[in-house]
Image: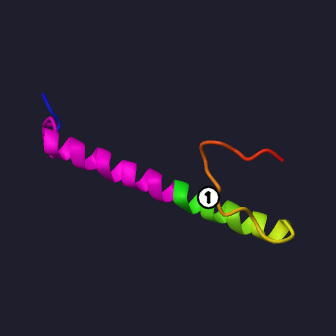
Amino acid sequence: MLPTGLGTVEPENQSTILRLLTERYDDLVNERTRIINRLHVVLRDLLPGGAPTRLSAEKPQPS
């Protein structure tokens, strides 16, 4: 017997799942961009002449 006031759980349809995954992916891309921009600002402040303009999260530059 189910407690009163609780509904049954229905499985999500494929379009809802894809929408949720797409939103999560967009959030991750935006966060990655924000972190790279913050790193660029810190490096610009620490390095004479500014930071390199070709920063990448995939391959760090040798120091």
Residue stretch in magenta: 4-31
For residue 50, above or below residue 30: below
Residue 29 spot, x, y in % from top left: 45, 53
Magenta stretch: dominant SS? helix
Instruction: Answer whether residue 15 is magenta in the image.
Output: yes
Residue sitting at x 23%, y 49%: 19
- Residue drawn where x is 15% and y is 46% of the image: 5
**Which amino acid type corresponds to the residue marked 1 in the rendered image?**
Ile
Residue situated in front as seen by the camera: 37 or 1: 37
Percent of width and height locating residue 15: 15, 45
Rendered location of residue 55, percent (x, y):
65, 56
Mark 1 surroundings within 10 Å by alpha-carbon count, few (fewer than 14), some (14 through 19), many (20 or more): some
Q: State left or right for residue 29 relative to residue 58.
A: left
Find the residue positioned furthest to the right: 48
Horizontal side of residue 9 vs 53, given as left or right: left
- The question of residue 2 being in magenta is answered with no
Determine the residue located farthest toward the top in the rendered image: 1
Rendering colour mode = rainbow
**Residue drawn at the location 38% of the way across and 48% of the way down:** 25
54 horizontally vs 16: left or right: right
Residue beneath disc 1? 36
